[in-house]
Amino acid sequence: MFRRGRYVYVGSAQNGVEKRIARHFTKNKRLWWHIDYLLSNPFVRIEKAFYKKAGKLEECRIAWLLSRFEELIKGFGCSDCKCKSHLFRLKSLKNLNKLRLKLGLTELRR
């Protein structure tokens, strides 16, 4: 069970970030990844999506940075790496905005 709040998910899309993010915004899809199950909940909505063209290791680096100051959801979205989580419950948007600017993440406009 997830507590009410804002969450940030870190994922990679090595074969097309725009296509992967568009898939996440779609409600009717085959449930495959952890994030698919979370997003299928009618009480969950995506507010914003950010991306960065980078290698697979950047996904884990960003997750590690988030784990230093946000509440991690243990074992979520990290079955293919050694991270503790790739989903975090935000304590504040302030830290996320600082990290977004530091890492050079671009907001996907829909």
Image (tube, rainbow, N blue to C red):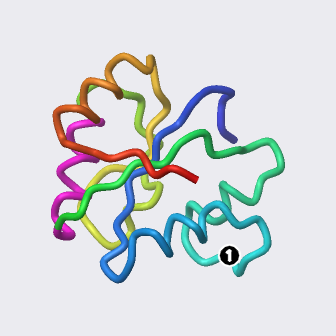
Circle 1 Cα neighbour tier, 10 Å, few/some/many (<14 / 14–19 / ≥20)? few
Q: Residue furthest right?
A: 42
Horizontal side of 26 relative to 11 (left or right) equals: right
Q: Nearer the viewer, residue 103 or 91?
A: 103
From the top left corner, tell me how far across and down residue 65 is, in percent: 21, 38
From the top left corner, tell me how far across and down residue 55 is, in percent: 17, 69
Q: Secondary structure at mark 1?
A: loop
For the stretch drawn in magenta, what is the main secondary structure? helix
Q: Is residue 105 above or below residue 30?
A: above
Q: Nearer the viewer, residue 20 or 65?
A: 20
Region in magenta? 55-67
Q: State the residue at coordinates (57%, 30%).
A: 6
From the top left corner, tell me how far across and down residue 51 is, in percent: 35, 54
- Quadrant where the image shows the N terminus: top right
From the top left corner, tell me how far across and down residue 40 is, in percent: 75, 60
Q: Nearer the viewer, residue 8 or 79?
A: 8
Quadrant hosting residue 23? bottom right
Q: Nearer the viewer, residue 37 or 101?
A: 101
Asked if the stretch drawn in magenta spans residue 90, the answer is no
**Which residue is labeled 1 in the image?**
31
Q: Is residue 98 above or below residue 65?
A: above
Residue type at the position of mark 1: Leu
Q: State the residue at coordinates (33%, 73%).
A: 80
Q: Is residue 2 above or below residue 38?
A: above
Q: State the residue at coordinates (44%, 17%).
A: 92
